[in-house]
Image: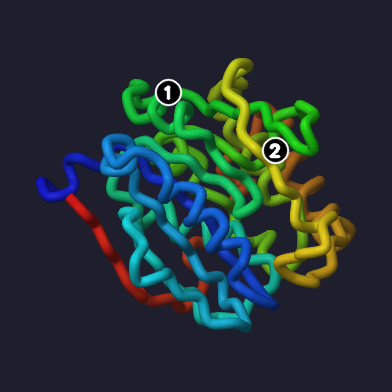
Amino acid sequence: MLKYQQIKLTYVVPVYLEHNLNGLYALINSYSAYKPSVLRHIHFIFINDCSPVEITIPEDCSLNYTLAKITTDIKWNQGGARNLGVHLAKSQKLIVTDLDHIFPEAIFKFLVTHPIPDHIFKFRRKRDNARNQAHFNTFFLSKSIYFKSLGVDEEFCGNYGHEDTFFVAFQKRLGTKIFTFKDKTIFSHEHKISNNRHHNLIRDLRPTADLYEAKKRILLDQSRDPFDAHSRLFLNFEWHLVKEEIHL
């Protein structure tokens, strides 16, 4: 698609908000202050994961963005929302992340010019002025690598957790290496421990633990085809495009 040739990097973020749009608007306001020479090459994809509040993008938003809405109400469907975001991506290079994370302008500038990655890269993060380990589900990778493992397995959706752990384990079984940019730090706000929580969904890993262990056993069995571990569920919900603004 020639019209999108200037898009070098796609930023995919699921959005599930129950109370207000403060978290989304804070992210948009932060990025809107970056230089147009950097932002013109970045496409932000916001996936409204059936939020009970209406998700809208400010009319004066200058970012290149797509807003899509999942209309099937599946709890903890962030894996499906990621799959949809990557499906809609118009570039090979991707950032897949959460609403809690902010990337400094310097990192965007670096990634825009970075070669298409052959593996998965993670980022160190800073929270409360302290540097933490890399987050387990924020990645820089290519669209091809993302789909190397058939995307996120949506069999985990409906309950909390393990879909990201399985995604990484499956990628490693397929030979993908996982690296961390040691000098590239992002900022984490961690809404779940703040007074401005995005939602009140219960975080309970127990319902998905047995499913993950069963899939992991397949991956560890060198005599088995690793793809036997994946359910093949993909975009297992109804969705539609809400709005798209590409300023080229």
Do the CB atoms of the residues marked 2 and 1 lie less than 8 Å apart? no
Q: Residue 186 sits in which quadrant?
A: top right
Task: Answer yes or no: is residue 173 visible.
Answer: no
Between 64 and 8, the one lying in front of the other is 64
User: Residue 118: which numbered mark, if any?
Assistant: 1
* Amino acid residing under circle 2: Phe
Of the residues under marks 2 and 1, which one precedes in the sequence? 1
* Badge 2 density bin: few <14, some 14–19, many ≥20, Cα 10 Å: few
The picture quadrant where one finds residue 63 is bottom left
User: Going 42% across and 23% down the picture, which residue do you hit?
Assistant: 118
Marker disc for residue 136: 2
Which sits in the foreground, 128 or 110? Answer: 128
Query: Compared with residue 82, is residue 52 higher up or lower down, i.e. above or below?
Result: below
Relative to 100, residue 124 above or below: above
Instruction: Answer whether residue 39 is visible to the viewer in this image.
Output: yes
Question: What residue type is disc 1 on?
Answer: Asp
Give percent across and percent down for residue 193. Answer: 84, 55
Place of residue 158 in the rendered image (x, y in percent of width and height, measured from the top left): 70, 69
Q: Quadrant of residue 165?
A: top right
